Amino acid sequence: MKKNDASSGPTARRDRPDVLPLKGEIDLHVSPSVTASLNAMIEKKPRLLVVDLSEVTYIDSAGLAALIEAMQKVEAYGGKFLLAGLQETVRSIFEISRLDQVFQIFPDVRAAAAG
């Protein structure tokens, strides 16, 4: 399987600083940079933080743990943590782990920002 080649890690979109687009496989090797990016965004205490998973092809337990930890931090200060754009393979991982009942999931970033 192809690994995520973003050596510097994911970064928030310039036009939407409250959106973190991820791509490729979010696994044990990539999740530390995802956690670091999320923590940097959370420090600014955005009212809404959206993780765009539309280009993510796989996520393992380490990736799920990074998202859970970030969601808990955002909800602790009263913000909203949303996921957007899950591909079918990734959505099935959330459904099997029953995390689709924990996270607020939207079809795309626009819907998440509106909702």
Image (cartoon, grey):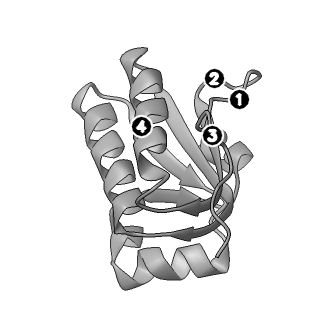
**10 left or right, relative to 41:** right
* Residue type of the residue flagged with mark 3: Ser
Q: Decide: is 85 above or below 75.
A: below
* Residue 25 position within the rendered picture, expressed as x and y whole percent measured from the top left: 59, 64
Foreground tag (1 vs 4): 1
Q: Which of 103 and 93 is in front in this view?
A: 93
Q: Decide: is 49 above or below 62.
A: above
**20 left or right, relative to 35:** right
Cα distance, mark 3 to mark 4? 28 Å
Query: First in sequence: mark 1 or mark 4?
Result: 1
* Helix, strand or loop under label 3: loop
Q: Decide: is 83 above or below 77.
A: below
What residue is shown with label 4?
A: 80
Res 50 → quadrant: top right
User: Who's the residue at 43% across and 80% down the image?
Assistant: 95
* Helix, strand or loop under label 4: strand
What residue is shown with label 2?
A: 17
Query: First in sequence: mark 2 or mark 4?
Result: 2
Q: Which residue lies furthest to the top in this view?
A: 44
Query: First in sequence: mark 3 or mark 2?
Result: 3
Q: Residue furthest right?
A: 15
Q: Residues within 10 Å of mark 3 (few under 14, many from 20)?
A: few
* Residue type of the residue flagged with mark 1: Arg
* Residue 56 position within the rendered picture, expressed as x and y whole percent measured from the top left: 64, 62
* Residue 12 position within the rendered picture, expressed as x and y whole percent measured from the top left: 63, 29
Q: Which of 106 and 4 is in front in this view?
A: 4
**64 left or right, relative to 2:** left
Residue 13 disc label? 1
